[in-house]
Amino acid sequence: MPEQANNPLHGKTLEAILTELVAKYGFPELGYRIRINCFLEDPSISSSLKFLRKTPWARKKVEDLYVSGK
């Protein structure tokens, strides 16, 4: 799959991406950078994953932040 060669998200799960972002920024900073309540109100990896899997626009913002930080 040559189209995946330059894709920085290839092989990364949403959980792995979110875990790396939380380790790098923490939930308060993530909530500041991406205004999503799951990062601001009683945040956890599992609750954030549930929300992000159901909400494509929010997932895109998280993935974009991950890519821009690489």
Image: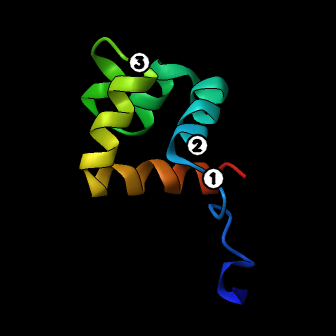
State how far apart marks 1 and 3 are (Cα): 19 Å
Q: Quadrant of residue 43?
A: top left
What secondary structure is marked by label 2? helix
**Residue appearing at x 61%, y 39% in the figure:** 16
Q: Nearer the viewer, residue 58 or 51?
A: 51
What secondary structure is marked by label 1? loop
Q: Do the CB atoms of the residues marked 1 and 3 lie less than 8 Å apart?
A: no
Q: Give the mark nearest the N terminus, 2 or 1.
A: 1
Q: Do the CB atoms of the residues marked 2 and 1 lie less than 8 Å apart?
A: yes
Q: Give the mark nearest the N terminus, 2 or 3.
A: 2
Image position of 5 (left or right of 30): right
Q: At which x and y percent is residue 17?
A: 58, 43
State how far apart marks 2 and 3 are (Cα): 14 Å
Q: At which x and y percent is residue 19?
A: 59, 31
Residue hosting label 1:
12
Residue hosting label 2:
17
Q: Give the mark nearest the N terminus, 1 or 3.
A: 1
Residue hosting label 3:
44
Q: Residue furthest bottom?
A: 2
Identify whether 68 is placed above or below 23: below
Q: At which x and y percent is residue 45?
A: 45, 24
Q: At which x and y percent is residue 14?
A: 51, 46
What secondary structure is marked by label 3? loop
Identify whether 65 is placed above or below 49: below
